Amino acid sequence: MKILLLEDDIMLNRAIKHYLESTGHIVVSTIDGNGCLETLSKEQFDLLVFDINVPDIDGLSILEKLHEQKKMVPTIFISALIDIEDITRAFDIGCHDYLKKPFHLKELTLRINKILKTRLVPQVHKRLSASYSYDSENMVLYFDNEPQILPKKHIQIIDLLSANRSLVCHYDMFRDYVWNDDEIDNATIRAEVNRVKKALKEDFIINIRGIGYMVKRPN
């Protein structure tokens, strides 16, 4: 899942980002309201984790702006504010959960998992390795959140593998999806996949000898 974090406490920001990335999420972090809005104008996210009292524009106002633009993204607020009026406003404008500071990082994971179970969250960004993720909606491969330019056939190979993470993609699947059922042999497929593997900074494609290839879900 690709998450946008807004938290102005630098130490807490780093701790949350590191923890969520260690559990398999992709995290882009911001420390103020303007930076958060700028990031939202350029990228899509599956989940927002917002502090409320941040510089420039507060987290509540940012969520209001998003809803005015008809952008509905599941949102968790993390805040030291405990006044019932603040909490009520947060839920009134459409947040999905509210976590009071201080909190254990594992509790944040529990709240995220609850949203995943109760709502259909469009996880277009799939984690493929420690640094690679794939946007299946736009067919873009990212390395450390930076888009990578690859030939069309290489992207099709990654698209097939990412759609079947933890499953073996047989040679016939590559023939059908990447080569449009052309009569090509397994050696041609292996050669093209090897070119993809050589172009990667982290090799996440696993060779299943004599059968095909797969990508495992990162731990």
Image (cartoon, grey):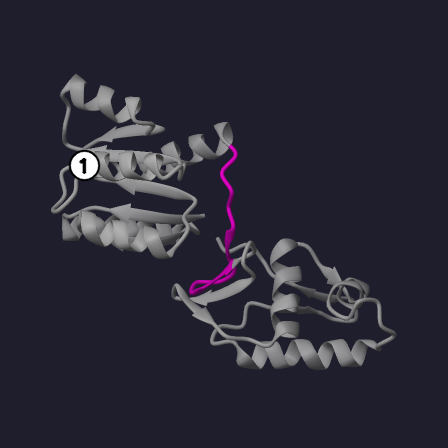
Is residue 17 at all visible to an observer of this figure? yes
Q: For residue 167, which quarter of the picture?
A: bottom right
Left/right of residue 209 with respect to residue 62 in the rendered view: right
Nearer the observer, 4 or 61: 61
Nearer the observer, 40 or 52: 40
What x and y, as percent, mark residue 155?
Answer: 60, 69
What x and y, as percent, mark residue 56?
Answer: 13, 46
Instruction: Tell me the kind of residue under disc 1.
Output: Ile
The relative height of residue 50 versus residue 166 in the rendered view (above or below) is: above
The relative height of residue 116 versus residue 93 in the rendered view (above or below) is: below
Nearer the observer, 114 or 135: 135
What x and y, as percent, mark residue 204?
Answer: 55, 67
The magenta segment is 120-134
Which residue in the structure is indicated by mark 1? 52
Q: How many numbered marks appear?
A: 1
Q: For residue 89, which quarter of the picture?
A: top left
The relative height of residue 47 versus residue 153 in the rendered view (above or below) is: above
Q: Secondary structure at mark 1?
A: loop
Residue sticking out furthest to the right: 183
Q: Is residue 34 magenta?
A: no
Residue sticking out furthest to the front: 69
Left/right of residue 144 with respect to residue 133 in the rendered view: left
